Amino acid sequence: MRLLTASSLLFAASCLFAQGSPKPIEIKVVVVNMFEVGNDTGDVPGEYQYWVEREHLDTVLPFPEGYHDLRMNKDGVLGVLTGVGTARASATIMALGRDPRFDLTHAYFVVAGIAGIDPAMGSLGSAVWSDYVVDGDLAHEIDAREIPKEWSTGYVPLGKSTPYEQPRTARFGDDGNVYQLNPSLVDWAFQMTKDIKLEDTPGIAERRQQFEGAAAKRPPFVLRGGNLSASTFWHGKLMNQWAHDWVKYQTDGKSTYAVCGMEDTGTLQSLAWLARSGKVDLKRVLVLRTASNYDQQRPGKTAAESLAETKIRQYSAYLPSLDSAYRVGHVVVDDLVANWSKTRDNIPSR
């Protein structure tokens, strides 16, 4: 009797798996959220809950390789919760992309989460479609007490020796530093949603009047802008100036900083590598961030005093920003699904 080698057994097992495995589920849209407070439904919401309830993501799929179980509806919309921070987001999205249960080759990815907003660009509850996502973690840093007098910041681009040193690109290139979202798709999403009326409340109306500038005082609205993604929750006017300069520098002046989130470069890094292997299409990715709070103190307050007020679920526009993320995002998701005969093979553009 012939004995099978370990490699022969592995080959035989893989053939049996291939013969017996079901056809992967074709996913139309993946909705990516980052945190949930408690249960997926029925209690105080995080970013996931409104999508679960309102998009009827009723089918729960175990996902031990990722942060949280997946959810799907009958129309081919898949919900994924990544967990907070770049590392969790990156690991979860990579696990999803490698999951043999799903065909993601034509799927659109809509990242929908809350953020801090620059009051010069928008107001509480506003929704921002990201044109660029810029990493705010990959850098050198000097303690503030040791910054040379001629420097505007102690944050130095990776591979450089002074702030905003030119030429910008270094031996590290832009791998993981800067992601430009598909301009045509971003413009299509913006044009479709720019006139949506967003939830306004007496509370956020009162808070925005405490800030200066026309944009900060406007009722919530939809806009486009740069997204600074960093795992450190920073706050204050001076940090805001750094964010502006950093986004301008990293995008060669092509984007203007508007919102700050945490996870998006981690998500995009995994999607970029999955796209390189043919598992997803990076041109089908949208990032929507909605303003739960301003990224700096209001006049008369210090940055430290303002930060003390900025706790999760105590953000000035926590619930309105969650509502804005769904109210704006679902219009795009539902349109992609409703027109799947066209959008499956043709990416929408304005």
Image: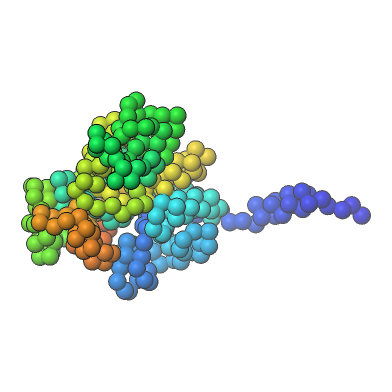
Left or right: where 238 falls relative to 209: right
Q: Residue at x 61, y 56 (%)?
A: 21
Which quadrant of the figure has residue 241? top left
195 relative to 312 in the view: left or right: left
The C terminus lies in quadrant: top left
- In depth, the one of 141 and 22 nearer the eye is 141
| Quarter assignment of residue 313 | bottom left
Residue 157: x percent and y percent? 36, 36
Of all residues, the one furthest to the top in this rendering is 167
What colour scheme has been applied to the protein in the rendered image?
Answer: rainbow
Where is residue 302? Give x, y as percent: 16, 56
Picture quarter with the N terminus:
bottom right
Residue 176: quarter of image: top left
Q: Is residue 82 left or right of residue 197?
A: right
Write the residue at 65% across / 57% down.
Answer: 20
Q: Foreground: 1 or 144?
A: 144
* Image: 333 above or below 55: above
* Residue 133 in sight in this render: no
Residue 242 coordinates in the image, percent (x, y): 25, 42
Q: Residue at x 20, y 55 (%)?
A: 303
| Pick the front one: 248 or 241 | 241
Q: Is residue 102 left or right of residue 157?
A: right
| Residue appearing at x 65%, y 52% in the figure | 18
Image coords of residue 116 (percent x, y): 24, 53
Q: Is residue 59 visible?
A: yes
Marker count (numbered): 0
In the rendered image, the residue lying farthest to the bottom is 42
